[in-house]
Amino acid sequence: MRPVMKTALLMLAVMALPAVAQDVPPDTLVKNVTLEVVDLIVKDKDIKAGSRAKLVAVIEAKVLPHFNFTAMTALAMGQNWTKASAEQRKELTEEFRTLLVRTYASALAAYSEQKFDFRPLRAKATDTDVTVNVRVLQPGAQPVTLDYSMEKTANGWKVYDVIVGGVSLVANYRTEFANTVRASGVDGLIKDLRAKNKSLEKK
Amino acid sequence: MTRGHLRTALLCLLLVSGCATVEGERDPRDPWEGFNRGVYRFNETFDEYVAQPVARAYVAVLHQEIRTRVGNFFSNIQDLLIGANNFLQGKFEDGVNDWARFAFNSTIGLFGIHDVASDFPGLEKHNEDFGQTLGRWGTGPGPYLILPFLGSSTVRDATGTAVDWAVQPVGEVRPIELRNTLYGLYFVDTRAQFLEASRILEEAALDKYVFQRDAYLQRRRSLIYDGRPPREKIE
């Protein structure tokens, strides 16, 4: 396909997305995306053989659009978010996003063989901030809870935190971020995150 | 482990922890960070050179099917303690559920190696221990504490572990060799179950010590509220 055509098609697809996503209730969205991704993971030969790059690519394409990474980074930064410049915020979000996608990809791959139990949403139709509860059923062990904190935006529902077995991913980075910022500033944190992502790329 | 070994291990521990210093502000939840980091390093070394290689070999040699049976066997014994802790927490329905699981799995499930109870609707596995029971009745976690070989804990949870360990029935198994084999198998099987999780932790953390500590404290808080802790407002 000619590059111009490709770009045009891509733009069309991007424009069409929000219109569709907007109408999907948050619990249905989580269910559909999870099942679709797990299905892809299980069926893909390269991922089965351990291709991290392909796994990350799947997550980027299917899961990423439903996450609000700026909100996640802001929450993990806490008070320090106000200290960061617009440029720093952009870089932080970018690096944190890369790290989270990798972690999320690893976790999902580890659970992909298990059964998922999508719990009914306990929220009013007018709520704009909800938690979608999913449970991963494992034989001989207590189910692992997977909770998605989601917020309603103009572009549909967006995830701003994932809570695995009672552990909020965003909250768990708060102390680490605060320690690093105290020791070496916001730029130090960006540097650390970048180095971390670099070291993971090699694996 | 013999007395002599234990003494050597403790000595090593003191040596590593002696030089541990902490920079920056202290976390109020972790006043003994210097000591903890020392034990942490000792545990990491032990894990890297002993526990992990053994667990990997165990996974490589034994088929998943058999490992699941081993896990089920110990999980079944734990259901006894889980039930007792549910009773102590006043959750009688859950306690009955746990002991019903134990009854089913010990008989139809052949000494627990088959988890038949989980196929019954409503007979779901729970997660309880004496540390949670203490927490349920209002005991705070106290300072964070890393235990040699066992890892993350708090003063409250370490007390709980000691109590659970004192009353668990495997200690009564004789001959001693069989009991020790069961203990060994239990630790190897448990480590093997967390191989994947520890790899993810390794990838996700900037400072593994801090990440693991915060995850542990969050997880314990959630468990005490049975997965529904009051929502903490994160600003």
Image: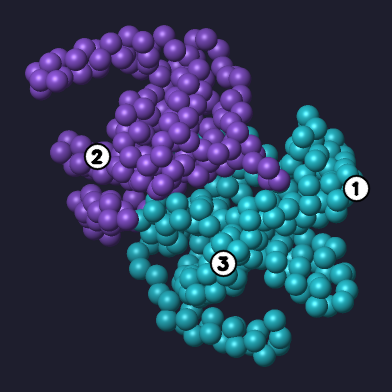
Q: Residue furthest front?
A: A45
Classify mark 2: helix, strand or loop.
Answer: helix
Same chain, marks 1 and 2? Answer: no
Callout 1 amino acid: Thr
**Residue B201 location in percent, x, y?**
45, 54
Looking at the rendered image, the quarter that the N terminus of chain B falls into is bottom right
Which sits in the foreground, B217 or A17? Answer: A17
Mark 3, residue position? B57
Q: Residue at x 55, y 52 (%)?
A: B217
Label 2 marks which chain's residue?
A
Q: Foreground: B215 or B231?
A: B215
* Other-residue count near label 2 (Cα within 10 Å), few / some / many at <14 / 14–19 / ≥20: some
* The label number, if any, that marks residue B107 in the structure image: 1
Q: Residues within 10 Å of mark 3 (few under 14, many from 20)?
A: few
Find residue B3 and report its horizontal and vertical position in percent: 71, 87
Please give the residue where the numbered disc 2 appears in the rendered image.
Answer: A94
Q: Under tag 1, what secondary structure?
A: helix
Chain A's shade in the image?
purple
Marks 1 and 2, how far apart at CA = 55 Å
